[in-house]
């Protein structure tokens, strides 16, 4: 899921300058799980806005805000409240914000920062494991992604900063290459250590990305 | 042919030192330091935004050394440039008569003076070694022919004391297989890990230049442990520096012992004397 967190309230206040009436949008999927843009957070946002003399014309939690057509349909059902607002305050990831902005000419204010594609350890504890690079070498790295979990995204083993198996960039973390090496060793195979991994093909990460099945 | 490659091929013990380009535009101080070092060493490394701190590009400093008849080892890291910029700088280096390279991943920007910078690492150090080799063979990384090809003597860094040892060695093997013609080691202070490394590295046939860092006092040793990735000064040495009447004299003695160790087991030493270059003759004697 996409991990997001609410922007600093001072920053948000700056974006709200001159906007008195707001329509709130949340997301029932990732932003809800991140406690950043679900029903509860919309309610708290409404209270905070009231403290700052802002009026909320209505609110809506879209099941999956990244769904462009669904966002359009849901917004249509709240046409009057949306029309009445000076701006839409959107508590979703950046993808959700753009579903909304592609469906209205109103000013759209994003209230969250999107952090990464995250795996869930438990609710509230998220870890980045995949960076969607389009050129996956997990089959050679015992299912641990160095592109994402090595601080430098190295492909051929640890850097000179590894110390006692810890990462140069964060001594609290195990070096990703240590974990890869240990698991490959337990599996009795050499994997990525059997060859020099060639230069990464970044062209496989299509930007702007589009995929049709 | 670079002197460094000739001497190593002839089995001669080499001495290298290093200078860091200035954080500014005047190279006077660095060049005069290099002039002082020149008679004592085979070649001088020129560091590349070391510790992820912004400085003048080492290409300029290395070219100026070359102009003054001093042989440089151009350090190049993968942190700040993508594969096009790296290849383009490699070609420029060759055009400026720079042959020796030390190809590195580079410290993470998090440590330096631009922690907000986007780290590149488009290639890793192994792939950069291959890039240099590919250019030497007359092609770029896309397989397109060059109009003329460079000649390099490319080396790589190794950290003999890194643990786990077997994991670190995997990368050393890849570096050798990718065209590393010499290794310069991270500063080491202990004999046992070095001997273990030399034993494992011997079959690769790549000469090893031992990194010897002059410790000036206990405070500096602690700073290295806390801030320089991959450098570990043993507590026992820190304690000795702390109680020494003349810590610098002790540091020189320790460095001399390491040079003696290198003469027995390695093919050269890389001296990091950090402002005490006048002590190099004492360290080498």
Image (spheres, coloured by chain):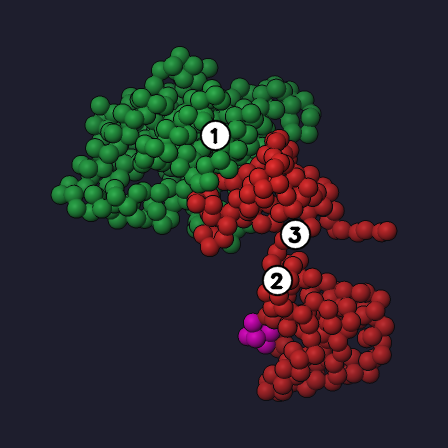
Query: Could you tell me which secondary element the residue under label 2 belongs to?
Result: strand
The residue singled out by tag 2 in the image is A121
**Farthest-out residue, left:** B245
- Read off the chain for label 1: B
The residue singled out by tag 3 in the image is A130
Query: Could you tell me which secondary element the residue under label 1 belongs to?
Result: strand
Q: Is residue B11 magenta?
A: no
Compute the Cα span from label 2 to label 3: 14 Å
The residue singled out by tag 1 in the image is B156
Q: Nearer the viewer, mark 3 or mark 1?
A: 3
Which picture quadrant has residue A32? Answer: bottom right
Q: Position of residue B198 (x, y in %)?
A: 40, 26
Q: Tell me the crowding category of disc 2: few under 14, some 14 to 19, or many 20 or more residues within 10 angstroms, Cα based.
A: few
Q: Which residues are magenta?
A: A8-13
Query: At 73% from the left edge and 71% from the top edge, which residue is drawn?
Result: A27
Q: Colour of chain B?
A: green
Query: At 81% from the left edge and 65% from the top edge, which residue is drawn?
Result: A68
Q: Main secondary structure of the magenta part?
A: helix
Q: Nearer the viewer, mark 2 or mark 1?
A: 2
> Does A195 sit left or right of A103 as displayed?
left
Identify the disc placed on residue A177. Answer: none
Q: Position of residue B127 (x, y in %)?
A: 58, 32
Q: Which chain is red?
A: A
Compute the Cα span from label 3 to label 1: 30 Å
Residue B62 to residue B12: above or below? below
Q: Are marks 2 and 1 on the same chain?
A: no
Dot 2 and dot 1 residues touching (CB under 8 Å): no
- Read off the chain for label 2: A
Q: Is residue B54 visible?
A: no
Query: At 45% from the left edge and 32% from the top edge, which residue is drawn?
Result: B157
Q: Nearer the viewer, mark 2 or mark 3?
A: 2
Query: At 78% from the left edge and 79% from the top edge, which residue is drawn?
Result: A82
């Amino acid at each position: 899921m996409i991990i997001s967190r609410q922007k600093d309230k001072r920053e948000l206040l700056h974006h709200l300058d001159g906007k008195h009436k707001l329509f709130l949008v949340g997301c029932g999927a990732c932003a809800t799980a991140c406690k950043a843009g679900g029903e509860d957070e919309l309610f708290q946002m409404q209270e905070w806005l009231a403290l700052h003399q802002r009026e909320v014309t209505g609110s809506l939690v879209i099941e999956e805000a990244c769904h462009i057509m669904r966002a359009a349909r849901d917004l249509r059902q709240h046409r009057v409240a949306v029309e009445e607002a000076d701006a839409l305050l959107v508590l979703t990831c950046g993808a959700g914000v753009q579903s909304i902005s592609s469906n209205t000419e109103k000013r759209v204010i994003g209230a969250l920062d999107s952090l990464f594609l995250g795996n869930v350890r438990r609710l509230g504890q998220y870890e980045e494991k995949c960076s969607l690079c389009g050129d996956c070498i997990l089959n050679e790295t015992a299912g641990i992604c160095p592109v994402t979990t090595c601080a430098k995204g190295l492909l051929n083993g640890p850097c000179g900063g590894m110390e006692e198996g810890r990462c140069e960039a964060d001594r609290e973390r195990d070096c990703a290459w240590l974990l890869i090496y240990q698991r490959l060793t337990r599996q009795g195979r050499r994997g990525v250590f059997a060859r020099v991994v060639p230069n990464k093909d970044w062209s496989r990460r299509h930007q702007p990305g589009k995929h049709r099945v | 042919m670079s002197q460094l490659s000739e001497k190593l091929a002839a089995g001669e013990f080499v001495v290298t030192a290093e200078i860091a380009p200035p954080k500014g535009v005047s190279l006077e101080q660095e060049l005069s330091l290099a002039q002082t070092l020149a008679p004592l060493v085979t070649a001088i490394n020129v560091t590349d935004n070391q510790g992820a701190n912004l400085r003048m590009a080492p290409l300029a400093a290395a070219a100026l050394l070359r102009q003054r008849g001093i042989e440089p080892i151009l350090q190049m890291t993968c942190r700040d440039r993508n594969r096009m910029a790296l290849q383009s700088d490699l070609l420029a280096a060759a055009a400026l008569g720079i042959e020796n390279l030390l190809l590195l991943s580079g410290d993470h920007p998090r440590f330096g003076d631009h922690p907000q910078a986007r780290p590149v690492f488009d290639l890793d150090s192994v792939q950069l070694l291959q890039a240099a080799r590919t250019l030497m063979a007359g092609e770029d990384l896309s397989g397109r022919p060059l109009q003329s090809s460079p000649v390099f003597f490319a080396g790589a860094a190794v950290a003999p004391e890194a643990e786990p040892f077997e994991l670190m060695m995997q990368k050393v093997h890849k570096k050798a297989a990718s065209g590393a013609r010499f290794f310069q080691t991270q500063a080491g202070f202990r004999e046992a890990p070095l001997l273990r490394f030399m034993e494992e590295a011997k079959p690769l046939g790549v000469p090893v230049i031992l990194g010897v860092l002059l410790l000036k006092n206990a405070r500096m040793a602690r700073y290295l442990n806390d801030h320089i990735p991959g450098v570990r000064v043993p507590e026992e040495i820190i304690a000795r520096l702390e109680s020494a009447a003349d810590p610098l004299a002790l540091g020189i003695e320790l460095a001399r012992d390491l040079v003696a160790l290198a003469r027995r087991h390695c093919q050269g030493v890389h001296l990091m004397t950090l402002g005490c270059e006048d002590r190099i003759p004492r360290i080498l004697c």
